[in-house]
Every structure is written in C-alpha cells, then in structure tokens.
Image: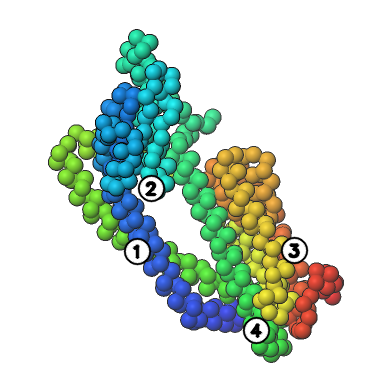
Amino acid sequence: MGKLKLIIKREFLAKVKNKSFIILTLLSPLLMAGLFSLIIFLNEKNSEETRTIAFVDESHQLETVFTDSEHTKYVNLTALGLEMAKVKTKEFYYGLIYIPKNDSLINLSKGVAFYSEDTPSLSLLSDIESKLEKKIRNLKIEQLHVDVEKIKATETNVNIASENFSGEKSSKIGSLLRMAVGGGFGYLIFMFIIIYGTSVMRSVIEEKTSRIIEVIISSVKPFQLMLGKIIGNALAGILQFIIWMISAGFLMLLVTSIFGIETASSATSVGQMNPEIVQQVQQTSASELQLVLQEIKSLPILTMFFSFIIYFLGGYLIYSSIYAAIGAAVDSETDTQQFMMPVLMPLIIAIYVGFSVIENPHGPIALGFSLFPLTSPIVMLMRIPFGVPWWQIVTSMLLLIITFIAIVWFAAKIYRVGILMYGKKPSYKELYKWLKY
C-alpha cells in the first residue's frame, strides 16, 4: 500500500509540475472567456447592422407589407420598373424584392424573386416570406367577404401541461433543462476519459521507451504501477477541472457583467419611452425565472450527484486501464492507432445514443445502452435527469463495477507482459496469448 501511495504521488506531482499542464490550466479559462466574449461581440455587431432593401410590386397589392423595422429599411422602386431597379439596387442597396403582376390572388404568390449581389441569409428570406404569406392570406379572406379580425379570433395556441401520475409537473423549459444537464454530464465524462486516459497511455509509453520502467518494475508489482499511474493522473485531472470550473465561472461572470452594462442602459432608455412594455417584459422574465427555479428544484439532484461520482470514477478507471494496457503493449504512440478505434467506438456510440435518449429516455435503446458497462457512464447520466427507476441505476452500477474488475484484471496481465517487451508491434493474437501467461 505504501508503494502504491508513492507511485500515485510521483505521477500526480510529475503531471502538475509539467509546463504544458500549468500553461493549459491557466490559459484554457482565458481562451474560453475570450471565445465567449467574441461570440457576444460578433452577435451584437451583427444585430446592429442595418440593411436597406428595395422592392418592385407590379401587383400593387403587397406594398403595405414592407414597413421599416429596427434593422431593415425598405425603398419602393416600383415606378422605375424591374430593370432600372436592378441597376439602382446593385449600386446602392442590399437587395431587391420583385413581385410580378398577377390578375388573380391565386397566382399572386408565384414568381416572387429576391435579387442581390450576395446570397441572402435564411432568416431574412424567411421573414419576407412570412410577411407576404400573411398579407396574401388576408387578401384572400377579404375576397371571400369574411372579416379578417373574426378569423384571427379563431386562432388558438395550445400549451399542453405535462404531469405524471404522482402529481409532478414538467414543462418545455424543464425538458430543455434536463437535456442540458444530462448532456453536460455526459460530455464531461467523455472529455475526461479521452484527455486523461490518453495521458496515462503516453506516460506508460514514455517510461517504457526511456527504459526507466525496468528500474521501477524491480521495486513494485506491475499492477501497483498501473493502478498508481491511473489514480495519479485522475487526481491531476480532477484538480485541473476544478481550477477550470472556478476560474471559467468567474471570468464568464465578469464578461457577462461587462456586456450587460450596455444592455441595461438600453433597457433603461426603452423604459423611459414606454414604461408599460418594460413592466410587461419584467413580469414575463420574473415568471420565466420562477419556472426555471421550480424545474431545478424538481431535478433529482442527490441522485445525479452520487451517480455522477460513481459513473465518473467507474468510466475513467475502465478506459484508463485499457489505455495503460495499450501503452504497455507498444513502443511508440504511432503504434497505438490499430488499438484506438475499438476503444473509442463505445464512447462515440454513447454520445450518439444520447440524442435518442433525449427524445425517448425510457425506450429500449436508452435502457440497453445505459446498462451496457462501456456506454453506461455517459448514457445513464443523460437519462437520470428525466427520472430513472432505482433498480436500473443499481443494476447498471453493479455491471459497471463487475466489468471494471474484469477489465483491470485483463489489462494488468497485458501490462505485466507488455511493459518489458520491445522491438515488435503486437497483434491482437499476441495480446490474447499474453492473457494466458
């Protein structure tokens, strides 16, 4: 036990004292905050851009549709005709909407075109199409001598309230929240396994190629060395993640407060012009915030927390043991490629299955992959926010623990033989032979 502690300490200190580890730990939150700031800045600049669009309405029935908005201005060039309007638009405006002359309302929507130098955005075209569709619809209703307002009065929005038989209610916001929490936990485990599992493999390869391993193996058992490397790298990774979360959270809060100054000032100016609208927006925001808080309280937080710890440790220990065995079996990192795909496939499948979990968290596919030990650390954590029976969680954890013990045993046998094998790239057949030694 004392030797295992020394190996864990050695691996942990070697990892955290590494220059690349220190630089990555310090720079990653700054890069994340910088990327977040850049996205906000670009979105604000993009929303501030004002486009002037010309239109030619030969039908003379849709002109009223083109009213100026905050970021879109319209210019009527119907009097110039299509060809002259194209010339002027190309020189002065962003684009040109052309509505041909039609004798009947049935054909009014046909032949509408948008001319521009560049490809227009889908949102702009969708907005114009929506306006034209509503106007043509209203014209057709008027032609039938039906009151448009009465037709509008018949339009109804239905919001279905979801509630289970025990009385717990859920909403669309709750579903989105569960998707975000489950997906976040799943991707966190996926990233941790990939980053620090390969770190264990590189550490084994480095010591094997430098022949340091021959000295170390004379003092400790191969199993102790493998387990020490896995735990030491895991502790370094957890430390790095804690630093990332704390620093990234602080920087995100700082960035949000900086960009929020302008938003607050603009909201104040709007409030001075139209206090009723601002009051309505504030009431809506308060009700939405209250709904979000209620949905957070309804989440199985304790179950999620304890399950995350078990699946986090179980998933990492399983895959890092496999990575350690691969590192012991080869002489260089380039030789690992033939073994990497079988290891990565369950993780990639687990992420893709997560999409079906979101749509049907209690279906047979979600259940099967949340019980299968190589995918359960990701898939089960994506299911738990939606509510999972205890027997499924317990069964999944037991299978995970049994698989972990079996894989560590197999990986240790490969590690014990491969750690002193040099000069030959092993095949799957030879790895199978090593299991019998």
Q: What is the quadrant of the N terminus in the image?
A: bottom right
Real-space Cα distance between discs 2 and 3?
64 Å
Image depth: mark 2 or mark 4 in front: 2
139 left or right, relative to 330: left
Image depth: mark 1 or mark 2 in front: 2
Q: Which amino acid does label 3 sit on?
A: Ala
Q: Could you say which quadrant of the image residue 158 lies in?
A: top left
Q: What is the quadrant of the C terminus in the image?
A: bottom right
Q: What residue type is labelled 1?
A: Leu
Q: Which of marks 4 and 1 is nearer the N terminus?
A: 4
Real-space Cα distance between discs 4 and 3?
26 Å
Q: Disc number at residue 207? A: 4
Residue density around tag 3, few if under 14, some if 14–19, many if 20 or more, within 10 Å: few
131 left or right, relative to 258: right
Q: Eyeballing the image, is 387 above or below 109? A: below
At x 67% / y 70%, what residue is drawn? 323
Real-space Cα distance between discs 1 and 2?
41 Å
Residue underneath mark 2: 117
Q: What element carries label 2?
A: loop
Residue underneath mark 3: 406
Q: What residue type is labelled 4?
A: Glu
At x 28% / y 49%, what residue is drawn? 48
Q: Eyeballing the image, is 205 above or below 103? A: below
Q: Is mark 3 on a helix, strand or loop?
A: helix
Q: Residue 194 location in percent, x, y?
A: 59, 65
